[in-house]
Amino acid sequence: MPDLIYIHGFLSSPLSFKARQTAQWLAEQRSDIRYHCPHLSPYPRATQQVLEALVESLLPSPVGLIGSSLGGFWATWLVEKYDLRALLVNPAVRPWEFMPDYLEVDLPSYHTDDSYRLNAGHIDEIKACDLPVRRHANYWLLAQTGDETLDYTQAVALYEGCKQTVEAGGDHGFQGFERFLNDGITFLFP
């Protein structure tokens, strides 16, 4: 049975809109696929360990990834490390560039009562997970030009040579994401 891992964004959770939308769609349309969406902290080493343990517990079954925002960065790391396939939704490309804005302040989670505090060492941890994109056929980039949080052109450049859908307008949440679930699942599990 194939497994889908949804990787949420920075300070988000399995309660995010796209994560819940994906879980509901799979339950209704593709109940043959097991859904996983671990709660990830913003601490890079902790996130790395959770994702590695999850993927390694599922292999050798087929594993597909959907990564949103910072989850797209983590999905890229997993694609390159384990030769998986990923649907990337407005992915973060160089997250260490925005991390200094979040250092040494209390960071609340968007969906839980959790709170976090990043330090400079966390920037080094996430940089250590930055892998070059080499498995071009394993990615499908979904980006909207109206993303108010991340510069979509960075993702377009990084994933050059990969399947890409770039839509005018929209926002960081990627308006109309559900339109891509059917084709996205077919791409992840050919």
Image: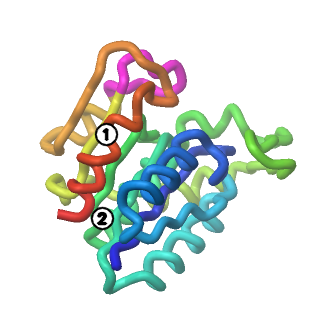
> In the image, is 126 to the left or to the right of 99?
left
Kind of residue indicated by mark 1: Phe
Residue found at x 22% / y 56%: 186
Observer-side mark, 2 or 1, equals 1
Quadrant housing the C terminus: bottom left
Label whose residue precedes the other's in the sequence (2 or 1): 2
Q: Are marks 2 and 1 in contact (CB under 8 Å)?
A: no
Does residue 130 appear anywhere in the picture? no
Q: Nearer the viewer, residue 11 or 44?
A: 11
Give SS at disc 1: helix
In whole angstroms, how far apart are the C-alphas of marks 2 and 1? 23 Å
Q: How is the image coloured?
A: rainbow
Q: Say above or below: 42 vs 110.
A: below
Q: Residue at x 58, y 60 (%)?
A: 125
Helix, strand or loop at disc 2? Answer: helix
Q: Residue at x 51, y 30 (%)?
A: 173
Picture residue at 61% right of the left edge, 59% below the top: 44
Residue carrying label 2:
80
Q: Measured along the vertical axis of the image, is residue 69 above or below residue 50?
A: above
| 135, above or below 110, in the image | below
**Depth check, front residue: 89 or 129:** 89
Counting from the top left corner in percent of width and height, residue 97 is at 53, 36
Q: Is 125 within the magenta? A: no
What is the quadrant of the N terminus in the image? bottom left
Which amino acid type is shown beneath numbered disc 2? Glu
> Residue 6, percent across and down?
48, 57
Q: Position of residue 132 (x, y in %)?
A: 29, 55
Residue 64 visible? The answer is yes
Answer with left or right where residue 154 lies relative to residue 8: left
The residue where tag 1 is placed is: 180
In the image, the segment drawn in magenta is: 144-153
x and y, in percent, of residue 67 in the image? 44, 50
